[in-house]
Every structure is written in structure tokens, then in C-alpha cells.
Image (spheres, rainbow, N blue to C red):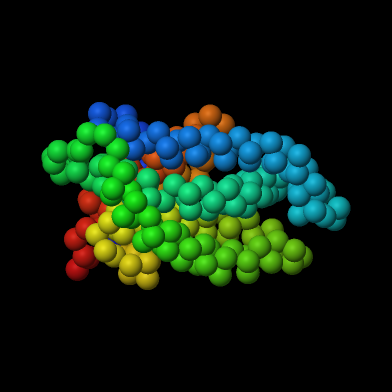
């Protein structure tokens, strides 16, 4: 089965309620602080650069299409900038996100969630989490650079934003399901194979994550919500191998 995009979207939205639960909130604070700091920098940077980027991506010959393409290009360009900050933010927050995912999983399975931040567990996850993040960055660059080239090819650049949006949704799902899967010893290459079992569900999850990250103020909660939602999706949608 290829999954249901609405099911994937639902998993993400369930993350909202999970991160507010007692015993889990403590693991949200540091990723949240990192998110606020990075998105604040993003807003300042994006406000100054967005117009120039749009002028470069939309040549004068396509001015008559600007009313139609502007929102699409705006979303694509914003996503490029967002991913730069998201990759940095996830690199910094990776050990805390792994601990958050572990706490969410304990809650979902009815196990006791440890009181107080488990710094020993966070430190023990530091190197594996960072190594996984570097692999995701390499994977992102491998596909992002060729897709970005499409933006400067005449005619092809009209469909390039759509390709980028689908890639962004996939990448966000891969980014955040890494935490619950990584906690169970599933390596990056196998993570990709598992997610490809239900691509529509995965894209539904990643699509909502992408939209949330584009909404001011709400985007501050994007990272912990995505980690919690991805943990639900792992348990209910991927823990048992597909037939």
C-alpha cells in the first residue's frame, strides 16, 4: 500500500497535543528555543533578500505570468531559505529531538516517562544523532542542487517549483522520522526504504510540516511537533514491516 496523505497529515497534527503532555514538555523547551532563534534570523534575512531572489527567478519575459507563478515561486524560494536554517537547527537540536521522540514513544506505549531532562541519554545520543544529521545533509545536497538548477532553465523553470515542493515534503518527513527510527537502530539507508513503502502518507506528513513552517509564530512549534508526530507515524505506520 502507498499510504494515505490525509493519514500522514493527521500524524503530524497529533504531535501538537503530545508535546503539551506532562513529562514531554521538558524535552520541547530546548528545540523550541533553537527554533525561535533561527526563525527570527530567517525573517530578518528573508525580508531583505526575497525581492531580489524573485526578480532573478522570474525573468522579464514571464512578467505576464507573474500573477500565477508568484505564489508558487514564493513558496519554493522561501523553502530554499527555510531548509538552510532547518538543517542548521536540526544539527544543533538532534540529541534533544532524539530524547523527545523517546519520551513521546514511552507515553504512547503506556510506559513511564522519566521526570526531569535525561542529560545522560542526551549526551550518549550526541554523536549518533550528529552523524545521522550529516548523512541527511549530504542526501539533501545530492538532490537539492540538481533541482535548483532547473530554476534557471527556460520553460523547465515553470515546473521546477512543483518538483521542489514535493522534494521538500519528502525531505522533512525523512528528517523527522529519523529520530524514532534511529532510536531503534534503523540506519539512514533503511529509513529511506521504509518510507518509500508508503510514499503518499509520507508526503502528506511532510506537506503539513512544510506548511506549518511557513506560518509566522506557528512555525516556532514546527520542530517539536514534527518530532512527536513522526514518532506516532513510526509506531502506527511503519514499525511493522509491510507484507
Spot occupied by residue 231 in the image (x, y as percentages of width and height) = 29, 48
Q: Which of 46 and 6 is in front in this view?
A: 46
Q: Residue at x 70, y 61 (%)?
A: 151
Q: Is residue 26 visible?
A: yes
Q: Residue at x 80, y 53 (%)?
A: 56
Spot occupied by residue 140 in the image (x, y as percentages of width and height) = 53, 63
Q: Can residue 7 be seen in this view?
A: no
Spot occupied by residue 83 in the image (x, y as percentages of width and height) = 57, 51
Q: Nearer the viewer, residue 216 or 150?
A: 216
Relative to 154, residue 64 above or below: above
Q: How many dots with numbers?
A: 0
Q: Nearer the viewer, residue 134 or 154?
A: 134
Q: Which residue is drawn at 48% across and 35% down?
A: 33
Quadrant in which the C terminus is drawn = bottom left
Spot occupied by residue 220 in the image (x, y as percentages of width and height) = 49, 34
Relative to 149, residue 63 above or below: above
Quadrant in which the N terminus is drawn = bottom left
Relative to 20, residue 200 above or below: below
Q: Residue at x 22, y 58 (%)?
A: 239
Amino acid at each position: 500500500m502507498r499510504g494515505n496523505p490525509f493519514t500522514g497529515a493527521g500524524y503530524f497534527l497529533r504531535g501538537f497535543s503530545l508535546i503539551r503532555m506532562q513529562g514531554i514538555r521538558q524535552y520541547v523547551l530546548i528545540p523550541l528555543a533553537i527554533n525561535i532563534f533561527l526563525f527570527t534570523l530567517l525573517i530578518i534575512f528573508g525580508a531583505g533578500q526575497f525581492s531580489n531572489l524573485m526578480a532573478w527567478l522570474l525573468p522579464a519575459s514571464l512578467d505576464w505570468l507573474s500573477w500565477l507563478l508568484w505564489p508558487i515561486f514564493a513558496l519554493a524560494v522561501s523553502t530554499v531559505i527555510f531548509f538552510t536554517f532547518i538543517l542548521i537547527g536540526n544539527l544543533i537540536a538532534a540529541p534533544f529531538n532524539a530524547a523527545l521522540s523517546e519520551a513521546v514513544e514511552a507515553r504512547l506505549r503506556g510506559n513511564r516517562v522519566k521526570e526531569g531532562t535525561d542529560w545522560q541519554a542526551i549526551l550518549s545520543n550526541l554523536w549518533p544523532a550528529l552523524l545521522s544529521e550529516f548523512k541527511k545533509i549530504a542526501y539533501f545536497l545530492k538532490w537539492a542542487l540538481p533541482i535548483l538548477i532547473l530554476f534557471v532553465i527556460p520553460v523547465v523553470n515553470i515546473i521546477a517549483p512543483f518538483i521542489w515542493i514535493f522534494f521538500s515534503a519528502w525531505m522533512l518527513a525523512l528528517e523527522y522520522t529519523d529520530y524514532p527510527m534511529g532510536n531503534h537502530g534503523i540506519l539512514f539507508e533503511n529509513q529511506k526504504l521504509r518510507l518509500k513503502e508508503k510514499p503518499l502518507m509520507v508526503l502528506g506528513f511532510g506537506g503539513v510540516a512544510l506548511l506549518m513552517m511557513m506560518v509566522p509564530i506557528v512555525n516556532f512549534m514546527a520542530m517539536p511537533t514534527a518530532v512527536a508526530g513522526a514518532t506516532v507515524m513510526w509506531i502506527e505506520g511503519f514499525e511493522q514491516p509491510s507484507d
